[in-house]
Image (cartoon, helix red, strand yellow):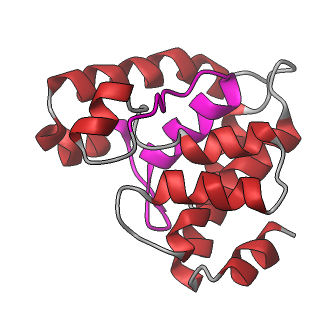
Amino acid sequence: MYERFLKKAGCDPGVIAHCLTVAGATRAYARSSVVDRPLLEAGAMLHDLGRSETHALDHAGVGADLAAAMGCPDGVVRIVGRHLGAGLTLEESALLGLLPVDAMPERLEERIVAHADNLVKGTREITAEERWDRSVALGRKYLVRAFRLGLDLEPLRHLR
């Protein structure tokens, strides 16, 4: 269902394959009864919807606007708009030349998609260590926030 949605929006096959991989990675964190699984699945599959128009950093905001225009529920729109790294503060967004909005993932499902996206490079799942090595240029503040996000979520991965 979501694959067709991404194709219709104009996402290329590589983006769709990436979204499928991220959605698969989120399932390991969805065993808890507090996780809204349908929201998590929709958000994971559509998190890169904005890549139908741009592959720049602003693809999250573009994707959130597209998702809203297509009638997606607010929870999905929030996941799409807040999935970059471990989130961006209003100030960080402005410094990066993005619209000055608070794009910090708050809801559990938003946080899971951001974390799972951090652990997928293309269609390959990578370790947290590989992600941190690739992100060192983003600075200490980002690395600490991404590391803490992983620490917060990893217990969910081990639920039975």
Residue 21 shown left or right of residue 91 in the figure: right
Residue extent of the magenta highlight: 100-128
Viewer-side residue, 130 vs 39: 39
Q: Position of residue 30 (x, y in %)?
A: 76, 33
**Number of numbered labels in the structure image:** 0
Residue 156 shown left or right of residue 83 in the figure: right
Residue 153 shown left or right of residue 77 in the figure: left
Q: Position of residue 158 (x, y in %)?
A: 65, 24
Q: Position of residue 11 (x, y in %)?
A: 60, 79
Answer whether residue 47 is visible to the viewer in this image: no
Viewer-side residue, 90 vs 109: 90
- Is 5 drawn above or below residue 152 in the view shown? below
Viewer-side residue, 57 vs 117: 57
Quarter of the figure with residue 34:
top right
Q: Residue at x 38, y 32 (%)?
A: 88
- Residue 36 painted magenta: no
Q: Position of residue 44 (x, y in %)?
A: 67, 50
- Is 79 drawn above or below residue 154 in the view shown? below
Q: Residue at x 75, y 60 (%)?
A: 69
Quarter of the figure with residue 138:
top left
Q: Residue at x 48, y 27 (%)?
A: 104
- Residue 123 painted magenta: yes
Residue 94 shown left or right of residue 116 in the figure: left
Q: Residue at x 15, y 39 (%)?
A: 136
Viewer-side residue, 27 vs 137: 137
Q: Quadrant of the C terminus?
A: top right
Answer whether residue 126 is visible to the viewer in this image: yes
